Amino acid sequence: MKKLNNNEYKVIISELGFDPFRILNSVFVLIGVIPLLVLFYFIMRDNLLHKFFLGNNGFVISIAIAISLLGYLYAYILVKNLLIKLLKYAQERKLADKEKTEVMLAVTHDLKNPLMTIKISMDNLREGVGGELNSSHAGIVKICLFNVERLFKFIGEILDSSKNDFIRMFINRELIDFSNIIKNEVDNFMQQTKNTNLDLRYSPSASNSNLWGDKNKLSRVVMNLISNAIKYTPAGGMVDVLLSSDQNTITLSVINTGPGITSDEMERLFKKFGRLDKHSEIEGTGLGLSIVKDIIDLHNGHITVKSELGKNTEFKVVLPSDLRGKVR
């Protein structure tokens, strides 16, 4: 096992917020001092030093003390080596995460060129280079361009996040109409649901859908929730998107028919790369819901899941209407 150098120790210890070796030393000092004080008390109380070590049992007592000290030192070494292994493991995980981030950034950067080619081609189609488009084809081109622009924004966020967490970067608090965001996302998925024979419906009943928050990040929340609902809804099923509000909060619910989610599976839903085994054949990375939760937490909101096996699943997001000065 490669030994960590002092600088690597310092980095990990600074991230922990405490020095485990200092705590270890303090614990073993206390463990060692207490029995020594007791022994010293009995020896000095009756001045029995010569009886302890020079009497009939002196040799046996000396051997016992020596074995105890050796055992004490060996225990200290074992625990210290355990701490070293744990710190080394933490360092290796940190390096692995860094390498994953670097790979993600490289891949994301390389995606810009083919996306630009797609954008130019779609712009040409929209301008009639290949012939005039009918209204249906023009709508498809508009959706494609909308998603290309969305991907460019997402790539920009990731590339700008090389030194910081990209979910928390550039939180932009502005007054937005949440209902319009949801409607745009629903319209964007309409073509996809027609092709898969799904019934996608948006039913807003909010008296006021204005809230303070980050428009792009909240769009990603809506996009991921609707996308997930569509992916896990069988053909002929239904996806309902609901919006309601009260005096202080706005609530978004996305309900889909389908197999449902068990209580054990729910524990893994919002973990990074946490995918359900029974749906492993469905394309995805397992990142969508963890990103959703990060964004909602950032907006001081919360998300809950309710599912009835064999019937439906509901994801409910509750956001405060006014986030000014309250974003973590």
Image (cartoon, helix red, strand yellow):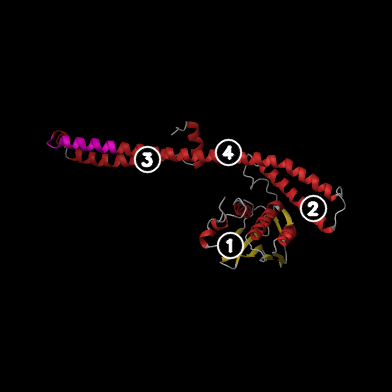
Asked whether 102 or 293 is in front, the reply is 102
Measuring 77% from the left and 43% from the top, which residue is drawn there?
117
Mark 2–mark 1 contact, CB under 8 Å?
no
Q: CA distance from mark 3 to mark 2?
A: 64 Å
Q: Residues within 10 Å of mark 1 (few under 14, many from 20)?
A: some
Q: Which residue is mark 3?
A: 79
Q: Nearer the viewer, mark 2 or mark 1?
A: 2
Q: Amino acid at mark 3?
A: Val
> In this rendering, does residue 186 appear at all?
no
Q: Residues within 10 Å of mark 2 (few under 14, many from 20)?
A: some
> In this rendering, does residue 105 appear at all?
yes
- Image mark for residue 305: 1
Q: Residues within 10 Å of mark 3 (few under 14, many from 20)?
A: few
Q: Residues within 10 Å of mark 4 (few under 14, many from 20)?
A: few
Query: Is 73 on the left or on the right of 136, as rendered?
Result: left
Q: Amino acid at mark 4?
A: Glu
Q: Nearer the viewer, mark 3 or mark 1?
A: 1
Q: CA distance from mark 2 to mark 1?
A: 35 Å
Which region of the structure is painted magenta? Answer: 55-71
Q: CA distance from mark 1 to mark 4?
A: 33 Å
Asked where in the image residue 320 lies, by quadrant, the reply is bottom right
Q: Which residue is mark 2?
A: 141
Q: Earlier in the sequence, mark 1 or mark 4?
A: 4
